[in-house]
Image (cartoon, grey):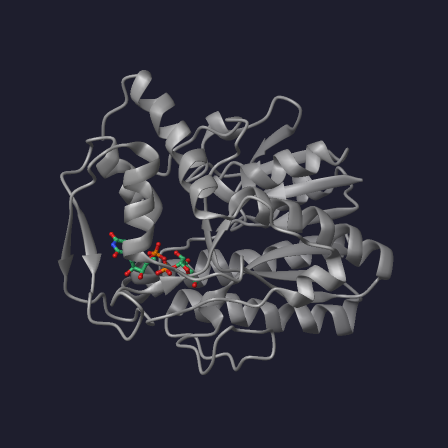
Amino acid sequence: MKVLVIGGAGYIGSHVVKAMLDAGHEVTVFDNLSSGQLINLFPRASFIAGDIRHPDDLDRAFSLGFDGCVHLAAFKAVGESMSEPERYSVNNLSGTINILNACTRHNCTNIVFSSSAAIFGSPAYIPIDEGHPTNPESYYGFTKLEIERILAWYDTIRSLKFAALRYFNAAGYDPDLSVRGLERNPQNLLPIVMEVAAGWRKELQIYGSDYDTRDGTCIRDYVHVSDLAQAHVNALAYIVREQKSLTVNLGSESGVSVTEMVEAARRVTGKPIPATYTARRPGDPSALYATSERARSLIGWNPTRSDVDTLISSTWAVYQYAIKEGKTL
Ligand code: UFG
């Protein structure tokens, strides 16, 4: 198939590109490189520089004709979405509407969309299944939920088939080291732990040690980015084959606490990784993990790299490469 990967130079997008290429698809990346990086591009994929806020850019890309597209172009910092909602409105909401309208204009009838566990808010029960009530606690989560609803309307009115993939905590790097771009100013736990291990940051702050969990720190469902990427390939195949839309949770189904992650990182990297316990971060639910039963049964998704050691070792390998190259913070 001819597949357009919008946001394909980003952290998750570049892994999706690799999985699509490995599945034999002809891939074009569309990215404005605001957080995506040229170093993440694969020579086997074509590249179009463009911005989802500009319908003309999208027309230029979609006029090449695609069987399907994957949309991962979004701002994704939960905290920032609460201080700068306007940017999230324009980029995540308007930008996505531009993409859907371009799909309609150019007869691209299949789209895979990056949704998020952030649509659920604090869990009413765990593990979280697809029927769990949605109650986003950030504007970021709200944008993802609104887009899921808009997708359902475009399916009803325009027969656009979509797969909404609700990622839990994406982590890890391609074990083949084919993606080497490090996130600039990372906000997530594992890259911050890696920056401490690399000596680029003095210490890790662990937000809260008094949660009602087995060791007092928050529990999350970390899923390897290569496993996530494979889900995009399977989901696209499903919606094209079945001509049915799909909404699934994507998690590894096992909860890992912050302390467990840090201790595993010390063991895997052999670095001391100093950490101090500080106040809770506002808005953090104590425990969050998924059941991915629906993804297993409908799209045959079977995460194989989401164990803690593989998450850490694959990430550390990329950081070690950067250290060798002389990178500093
Ligand atoms: N944490 C720390 N110290 C840090 C960074 C994080 O203790 O320096 C803790 C957080 O408090 C949390 C856990 O590590 O308990 C994971 O935090 P992340 O920021 O890595 O991830 P979140 O679970 O907050 O959010 C992630 C994605 C969001 C997505 C959400 C959905 O970043 O985009 O999962 O569950 F919306």
User: What residue is at 15 percent from the left and 65 percent from the top?
Assistant: 279
Q: Quadrant of residue 89?
A: bottom left
User: What residue is at 73 percent from the left and 50 percent from the top?
Assistant: 234
| Residue 16 position in % (x across, y down) | 60, 41
| As drawn, 34 above or below 38 | below
The answer, for residue 286, to whether it is visible in the render is: yes
Indicate left or right for 184 with 176 as reference.
Answer: left
User: What residue is at 70 percent from the left and 55 percent from the top?
Assistant: 111
Q: Nearer the viewer, residue 66 or 26?
A: 26
Quadrant for the C terminus in the image = top left
The answer, for residue 188, to whether it is visible in the render is: no
Q: Quadrant of residue 136?
A: bottom left
Quadrant for the N terminus in the image = top right
Q: Nearer the viewer, residue 273 or 239?
A: 273
User: What residue is at 48 percent from the left and 66 percent from the top?
Assistant: 117
| As drawn, 95 above or below 157 | above
| Residue 109 position in % (x across, y down) | 78, 56
Q: Nearer the viewer, residue 70 or 253?
A: 253
| Quadrant assignment for ligand 1 | bottom left
| Residue 315 position in % (x across, y down) | 41, 36
| Residue 134 position in % (x across, y down) | 50, 79
Number of callouts in the render? 0
